Amino acid sequence: MRKLRLPAALLSVSIAAAGSPAWAADTLRLLTWGSYAPEDVIEMFKQETGIEVEVTFSNNEEMISRLRATGGGGFDLAQPSHDRIHAAQLRYDIYKPMDLSRIDTSVYDPNLLGAVKANTTIDGEVYSVPHFWGTSGLVVNRARAPDLESFADLCDPRYEGRVSMRLKRTILIGMGYALGEDPFGAYGDIAEYGRIINAAAEKLIACKANVKTWWTGGDDLSNLLRSGEIVASDAWDGTAFKLNAENPDINFRPPSHGAMGWIDTFTLPRKTRAEDAAYQWIDFVMRPDVARMMSTHAGYVTAHKDGGDLTSDRLRESFNDAFSEEDVANIKWFASIPPGLEDLEGKVLERIEAAQ
């Protein structure tokens, strides 16, 4: 069986309150994604350390918004994706550098660790280390849409009213690639990038009749596919792998133009008050026994150097069913977002939403 292994090409990913707090010092306030804090792992951590974990589930946009509103306060550890840190820090100063001497970096996959360090180093200081990695592409019911292979195929008239999409920047980038463009390659030229995503927007507006509904979370999307209301959508691979365990007809499909690769990180908010607890949590969840539990729950591969071996057999089977060696080599890794691009994307997304 082909091993689930990260390509070495990932190394190329880089970029140029007053008063006493109401929470206890032995509480870790974690700002993270919906599947990254399983209750059994939280309970194990509490038993071993005595530290409580308060979890707030979020996404990249909300993480930045919450931390921007408080100047980096309110949370002790956040988990933004690797491409969403550099510009946010330069613009809003919401994070603080990490002390890598307080983390056991020997357990990390060196490609992942190197890529995240390259993307999140500012003035010689490293701001993040990796936790999970995965890709964004398509989830397809292959029995009902066997020929759906690209983001552009979501607009095929055969699937009118039978697909879903998430109205976020990934749909713009994926459609840009499907149109033969190179959105990541245009990051350094805001005018060119604007041209690409506006062309993607026109394609998406023209095919709004295909969209049954815009999904906002993995559970929403999963229920649409389980019920048969839709046959395909853009998706994270982990969401698709969970569905594949239930229904072998449904699985992730790396687009013919390449899946988009991301790495979710550990990053310290600037006003963290439980820094010791944050570092303890990072090392705890990267421990092999805990990393396996986390991977099984989340449906993604951890950044541990043995991450491919710390997945469940079911996840490994779903990954190998979805990805060929060529698909892995064709992953387009998210690069750090330069300042200004997300404002531009936001306006384009609003135009799509408002279009009749």
Image: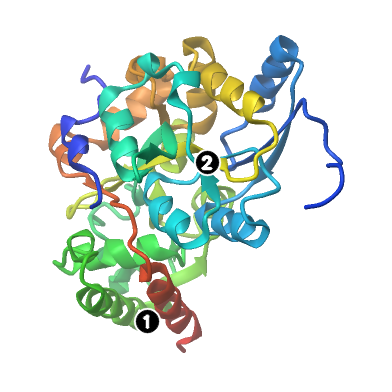
Residue in front for this viewpoint, 80 or 35:
80
Residue 244 shows in this picture: no
Counting residues from the start of the chain, the first of labels 2 and 1 encountered is 2
Q: Residue at x 51, y 59 (%)?
A: 229
The location of residue 20, given as percent across then percent down, is: 86, 42
Q: Kindly identify which residue carries mark 2.
A: 79
Vertical arrangement, residue 195 with respect to residue 126, above or below: below
- Quarter the N terminus occupies: top left
The location of residue 219, given as percent across then percent down, is: 58, 48
For this view, does 233 lie left or right of residue 218?
left
Corner quadrant of residue 327:
top left
Q: Kindly identify which residue carries mark 1.
A: 205
For this view, does 68 lie left or right of residue 103?
right
Q: What amino acid does circle 1 point to?
A: Ile
Vertical arrangement, residue 67 with respect to residue 6, above or below: below
Q: Residue at x 26, y 57 (%)?
A: 148
